[in-house]
Image: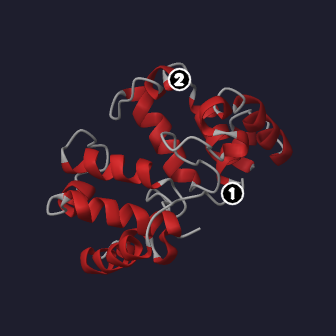
Amino acid sequence: LLGAMTLGVAPRPAHADAQAGQIKAQTCVICHGPLGNSTNPDYPVLAGQTQRYLYLQLKDFKEGRRSDPRMSPQAANLTREDMQDLADYFSQQRPAPIRTDSSEAAIDAGRRKSAEVLCTMCHLGGFSGQNEIPRVAGQYPQYIAKQLQDFRSHTRTNDAGNMASVTRGLTDDDIRNLSAYIASLQ
């Protein structure tokens, strides 16, 4: 507050930030669903994602460090304030449970693989995420699988190589099983 006053900038009340995010999110919900709860497995659930991760992904899309034919144009004209408002808004929403049809065998195999490659060292127990590490629990298995495949093939590289090293030794079956397990964590 003092820093804002010193710079001659009036701080915005917290409810103004929430309202700004909600208004700006109207474009996002077309793909990511109401309150950031996607109903399409091609689009990630944004609700409950970490604020820092959301902000950094929007910034990466805007600056070309991450690319997607649908998302990159959406982020191109966002200001820093827009990205902060959107990240704040979606991080405060509650994720809704998703429906999956994964078998118990796939979920169990994914649980074992997760322990083997130490996923929770970064994503934390329950895959809830922290700071710039995403919450992946409750994402659609198709979306999780695509991200793991993209990291493995180096199509996605906006994480300083951490996931590339983790995914390097994963088979397609490992990726399917990990995706089933992580999606089952609601």
Question: Where's residue 103, x and y in %?
Answer: 43, 69
Q: Is residue 181 left or right of residue 175?
A: right
**Amino acid type assigned to the residue bearing label 2 in the image:** Gln
**Amino acid type assigned to the residue bearing label 1 in the image:** Ala
Question: Where's residue 117, x and y in %?
Answer: 25, 74
Question: Where's residue 131, x and y in %?
Answer: 49, 60
Residue at image mark 1? 96
Q: How many numbered callouts?
A: 2
Q: What residue sits 75% from the left and 49% below the top?
A: 1
- Asked if residue 11 shows in the view, the reply is no
Q: What residue sits 60% from the left and 32% below the top?
A: 31
Mark 1 or mark 2, earlier in chain: 2
When the figure is inspected, residue 85 is found, relative to residue 64, above or below; the finding is below
Q: Residues within 10 Å of mark 1 (few under 14, many from 20)?
A: some
Residue at image mark 2? 74
Q: What residue sits 27% from the left and 57% below the top?
A: 163
Q: Which of the 4 image quarters holds residue 115?
A: bottom left
Q: Is residue 62 left or right of residue 51?
A: left
Q: Tell me if label 1 and label 2 are in contact, CB under 8 Å.
A: no
Colour option used: secondary structure
CA–CA distance between discs 1 and 2?
24 Å
Q: Which of the 4 image quarters holds residue 182?
A: bottom left
Q: Is residue 117 left or right of residue 34?
A: left
